Image: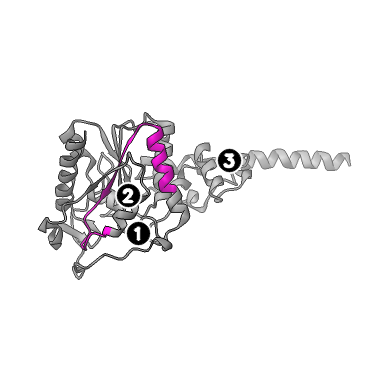
């Protein structure tokens, strides 16, 4: 029995020594990421007056530095391609916890899929995995069911296969990020076969309850922290969905305002200003951002 106890003790010590060696795979990945915006949030480095949140319609269509230069307020874009409202709520919650809270949040909503099932927008767990060395991130992954409670004690329980990829990440043509966090597209898809079409259908019954809740939670974060929340409707190469805007207004707090692009502007029916049917090119983003600036001037 004594021999067994000694062997168990030696094994336990050896296991924990070896296990701690895997910390290398937690500490290295953040430094290899090209997009380090979430890391900056966790380290309290995003202390801005105005924050842009959203998916690719926020990252591509709104140029934060342009707003900053025009309104003389500090701005930063925290929009992530392919992210959903639950991820946006997480970002804002994290921003408030670790940084000086912003005065204004522009939420670029996905018209009309913001609250609907959509495989193209989701919670961006891939942005959290490289940062799992942070207890805050690990706790979020536990809450979301991605990690177990053992990850509070064991490094191996925190590690995702992504952490073993220790090669330096490279930007693609679509992924280059400006210093202000925005990611406008300077070129157009070779395939220009997208056409302008009607976009009038919207069924409330198809909404996901968890997305509706996340939208309400995001609003509450703003109201409770005295942050002005403005929903922003970007141009698509299709008719604006009036029913979707009506639904967003219906579940919005009275203090939430909105900015809608000028649907009479013929530029937004010209393919030369679009990368594809859902995203503006940089020349279109400049025009739309100027629209936002004009409307912000009237609000502030």
Asked if one can make out residue 194 in the rendered structure from this viewpoint, the answer is yes
**Considering only vertical position in the picture, is 291 above or below 198?**
above
Q: Secondary structure at mark 3?
A: helix
Mark 3 or 2 closer to N-term? 3
State which quarter of the image contains the C terminus. top left
Local secondary structure at mark 2 = helix
Q: Is residue 31 visible?
A: no
Q: Residue furthest top?
A: 100
Question: In the image, is residue 297 above or below residue 279?
Answer: above
Residue sitting at x 15%, y 41%: 294
Q: Is residue 12 left or right of residue 292?
A: right
Q: Mark 2 or 1, which is nearer the eye?
A: 2
In the image, 151 versus 209, the foreground residue is 209
Q: Which residues are magenta?
A: 214-242
Residue 161 lies, in percent from the top left, at: 51, 53
Q: What's the distance in space between the residues labelled 3 and 2, CA to CA?
A: 52 Å
Q: From the viewer's perspective, is the residue at label 1 or at label 3 nearer?
A: 1
At label 1, counting other C-alpha atoms closer than 10 Å, the crowd grade (few under 14, some 14-19, many 20 or more) is some
The question of residue 225 being in magenta is answered with yes
**Disc on res. 249:** 2
Q: Please report the residue visible at 31 percent of the width from the left and 57 percent of the height from the top.
A: 244
Question: Quick check: marks 1 and 3 in contact, CB under 8 Å?
Answer: no
Which residue does the numbered mark 1 point to in the structure image? Answer: 113
**Which quarter of the picture shows residue 277?**
bottom left
Q: Which residue is mark 3?
A: 21
How packed mark 2 is, by other alpha carbons closer than 10 Å (few <14, some 14-19, many 20 or more), is: some
| Between marks 3 and 2 in the image, the one whose residue lies nearer the viewer | 2
- Residue located at (89% from left, 42% from top): 1
Q: Is residue 282 magenta?
A: no
Q: Position of residue 124 (x, y in %)?
A: 42, 51
Q: Secondary structure at mark 1?
A: loop
């Amino acid at each position: 029995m004594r021999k067994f106890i000694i062997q168990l003790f030696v094994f336990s010590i050896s296991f924990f020594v070896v296990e701690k060696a895997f910390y290398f795979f937690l500490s290295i990945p953040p430094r290899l990421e090209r997009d380090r915006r979430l890391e900056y949030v966790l380290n309290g480095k995003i202390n801005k007056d105005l924050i842009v949140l959203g998916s690719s319609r926020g990252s591509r269509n709104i140029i934060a530095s342009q707003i900053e230069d025009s309104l003389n307020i500090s701005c930063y874009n925290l929009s992530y391609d392919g992210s959903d409202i639950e991820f946006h709520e997480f970002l804002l919650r994290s921003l408030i916890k670790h940084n000086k809270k912003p005065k204004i949040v522009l939420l670029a909503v996905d018209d009309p899929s913001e609250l609907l099932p959509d495989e193209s927008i989701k919670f961006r767990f891939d942005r959290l995995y490289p940062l799992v060395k942070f207890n805050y991130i690990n706790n979020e992954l536990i809450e979301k069911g991605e990690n177990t409670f053992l990850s509070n004690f064991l490094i191996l329980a925190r590690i995702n296969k992504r952490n073993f990829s220790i090669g330096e990440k490279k930007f693609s043509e679509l992924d280059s990020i400006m210093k202000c966090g925005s990611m406008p597209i300077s070129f157009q898809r070779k395939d220009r076969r997208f056409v302008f079409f009607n976009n009038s259908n919207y069924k409330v019954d198809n909404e996901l309850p968890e997305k509706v809740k996340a939208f309400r939670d995001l609003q509450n974060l703003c109201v409770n922290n005295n942050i002005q929340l403005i929903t922003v409707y970007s141009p698509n190469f299709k008719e604006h969905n009036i029913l979707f805007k009506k639904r967003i207004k219906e579940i919005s707090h009275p203090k939430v305002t909105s900015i809608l692009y000028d649907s009479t502007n013929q530029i937004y029916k010209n393919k030369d200003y679009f990368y594809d049917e859902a995203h503006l090119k940089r020349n279109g983003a400049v025009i739309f951002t100027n629209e936002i600036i004009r409307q912000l001037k009237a609000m502030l």
